[in-house]
Amino acid sequence: QVQLVESGGGLVQPGGSLVLSCAASGTTLDDYFIGWFRQAPGMEREGVSCMSSNGRNTRYYEPVKGRFTISRDNLKNMIYLQMNNLKPEDTAVYYCAAHPAFSLRYLCEMTTKAFGSWGQGTQVTVSS
């Protein structure tokens, strides 16, 4: 099973940008679909974005479309989330996740039950 560790969170002003990184270990990510989730205090964990194992299929939560970009670097075994034009409502703990895609190379899911491996989370706070 892959182990995941996020980094890059912090405090940013509204309109600012952050790049979250997620380092994978234990196996290569080539055959995994990946995702980013977030959880605000008192709220359910929600899907932010996902990417298929072949990198050709991506999905985004409607409120972050056009502002967030998911990417992966299989050579470095890394997952990224570029976040631009951040808003106070983006404040949450952000988690990366991964799961084997097997033969489903275009599979991209944004539900928590679809993922078996999770990072520990990194806090993102958007405030002036």
Image (spheres, rainbow, N blue to C red):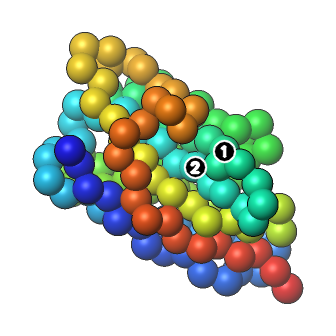
Q: Amino acid at mark 2?
A: Phe
Disc nearer the start of the sequence (2/1): 2
Q: Position of residue 32 (x, y in %)?
A: 29, 34
Residue pictured at 62% horizontal, 41% vertical: 47
Query: Which residue is denoted by mark 1 in the rendering?
Result: 46
Instruction: Tell whether 50 sits left or right of 30.
Output: right
Measured along the vertical axis of the image, is residue 122 above or below residue 105? below
Instruction: Tell whether 50 sits left or right of 55.
Output: right
Give the secondary structure at mark 2. Answer: strand
Q: Amino acid at mark 1?
A: Glu
Instruction: Tell whether 73 sits left or right of 107.
Output: left
Q: Position of residue 34 (x, y in %)?
A: 41, 40
Task: Tell me, yes or no, whether the two marked residues, 2 and 1, touch with CB atoms within 8 Å.
Answer: yes
State the residue in front, 85 or 78.
78
Residue pictured at 34% horizontal, 35% vertical: 99
Residue 55 visible in the current orientation = no
Give the Cα distance between marks 2 and 1.
5 Å
Q: How many other residues sit within 10 Å of disc 1, few (<14), some (14-19) or many (≥20)?
A: some
